[in-house]
């Protein structure tokens, strides 16, 4: 897979949640995203103001997308002065996908010129495997609706809204797929909008840099390959020294350090999501032996791979004596 797809596959866990909400003025709601979750808000119809945790409220136009990748609080309202009721955005809620109406003031119909319709959702993330690409994102990503701008993101919003507005046979499978699609389009749009230049650093710059993005794609596509800095540099069309300097400046760690981190992060996913024996997991992420893999895994995460697998599947259960080859103290 490509880098962005890999990042989503590694950090996402559980099923996303989404709701289509119709509000009748006056209305105001504060949302609190729980730890290990990210959320979004999209205005489909009517007036809406976004109330950040810090800073001044600002209006959202129809079609605007707001993504909140980290734990935090924010509000939506019909006007900046409207008081906010409290709501927790938890992707582990029992209700997965729904359409609901906010309580309307007495004597006022639910629909009308003052009605606002928003599409909101939450994704559950594994805090132990959050990619630095996500950690670099600001607390608030605002993608204003502009004619002809990010048409695929707009199409995903339209499709998701339609499935929640009028569920059809198959909506139960379509909605979670569309939510994952929406997340990828939001991130793709954000990175595409970031300014490029010789002084830019970080993951937005790394993905926009032809040489570094080529190297990242290569090691994500085949992490088990015995890569060297010189080999990655040649693949990217740069000398070893020039490649190493540029990669480290943009990604934030040297090429082989990132490769090791990514191999072990990929191993965490394989341990959690598959029943592959440890020697097969070791082979898939580029280790020549189960013992070498277990030692490296324990050094990185302070936990042997077998115990991590049991903990991820049976959280809170006591661990018997571990049988991993790396159960003995890891070598420094």
Image: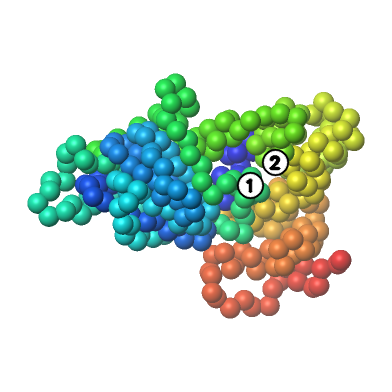
- The residue under label 2 is 202
Element type at mark 2? loop
Which residue lies at the image location 31% right of the left edge and 46% below the top edge? Answer: 79
Evaluate if marks 1 and 2 touch, with contact meaning CB atoms under 8 Å apart.
Answer: yes
Q: Nearer the viewer, residue 35 or 160?
A: 35
Which residue lies at the image location 36% right of the left edge and 44% below the top edge? Answer: 49
Q: Earlier in the sequence, mark 1 or mark 2?
A: 1
Query: Is 101 on the left-hand or right-hand side of 197?
Result: left
Figure check: 324 above or below 267: below
Query: Is 262 on the left-hand or right-hand side of 183?
Result: right
The percent coordinates of residue 246 (x first, y second) are 81, 36
Q: Nearer the viewer, residue 295 or 324?
A: 295
Mark 1 surroundings: few (<14), some (14-19) or many (≥20) residues within 10 A? few
The percent coordinates of residue 239 (x first, y second) are 89, 30
Report whether residue 250 is seen: yes
- The residue under label 1 is 136
Quarter of the image for residue 191 reads top right
């Amino acid at each position: 897979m490509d880098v962005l797809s890999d990042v989503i596959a590694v950090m996402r866990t559980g099923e996303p949640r989404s709701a289509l909400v119709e509000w009748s003025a006056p209305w105001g709601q504060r949302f609190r995203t729980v730890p290990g979750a990210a959320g979004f808000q999209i205005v489909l119809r009517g007036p809406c103001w976004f109330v950040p945790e810090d800073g001044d409220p600002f209006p959202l136009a129809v079609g605007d997308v707001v993504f909140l990748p980290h734990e935090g609080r924010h509000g939506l309202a019909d006007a900046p002065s409207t008081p906010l009721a409290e709501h927790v955005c938890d992707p582990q809620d029992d209700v997965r996908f729904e359409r609901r109406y906010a309580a309307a003031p007495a004597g006022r119909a639910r629909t009308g010129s003052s009605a606002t319709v928003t599409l909101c959702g939450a994704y559950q993330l594994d805090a132990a495997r959050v990619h630095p690409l996500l950690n670099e994102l600001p607390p608030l990503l605002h993608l204003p609706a502009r004619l002809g701008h990010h048409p695929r993101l707009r199409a995903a919003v339209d499709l998701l809204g339609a499935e929640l507005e009028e569920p059809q046979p198959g909506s139960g499978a379509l909605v979670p797929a569309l939510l994952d699609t929406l997340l990828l389009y939001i991130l793709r749009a954000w990175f595409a909008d970031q300014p490029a230049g010789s002084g830019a650093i970080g993951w937005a710059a790394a993905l926009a840099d032809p040489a570094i993005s080529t190297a990242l794609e290569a090691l994500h596509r085949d992490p088990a390959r015995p890569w060297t800095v010189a080999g990655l540099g040649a693949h990217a069309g740069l000398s070893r020294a020039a490649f190493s300097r540029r990669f480290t400046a943009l990604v934030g760690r040297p090429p082989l350090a990132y490769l090791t981190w990514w191999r072990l992060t990929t191993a965490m996913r394989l341990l959690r999501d598959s029943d592959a024996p440890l020697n097969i997991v070791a082979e898939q992420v580029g280790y020549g032996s189960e013992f070498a893999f277990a030692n490296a895994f324990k050094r990185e995460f302070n936990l042997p791979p077998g115990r991590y697998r049991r903990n991820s599947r049976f959280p809170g259960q006591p661990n018997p004596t571990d049988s991993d080859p790396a159960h003995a103290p890891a070598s420094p």
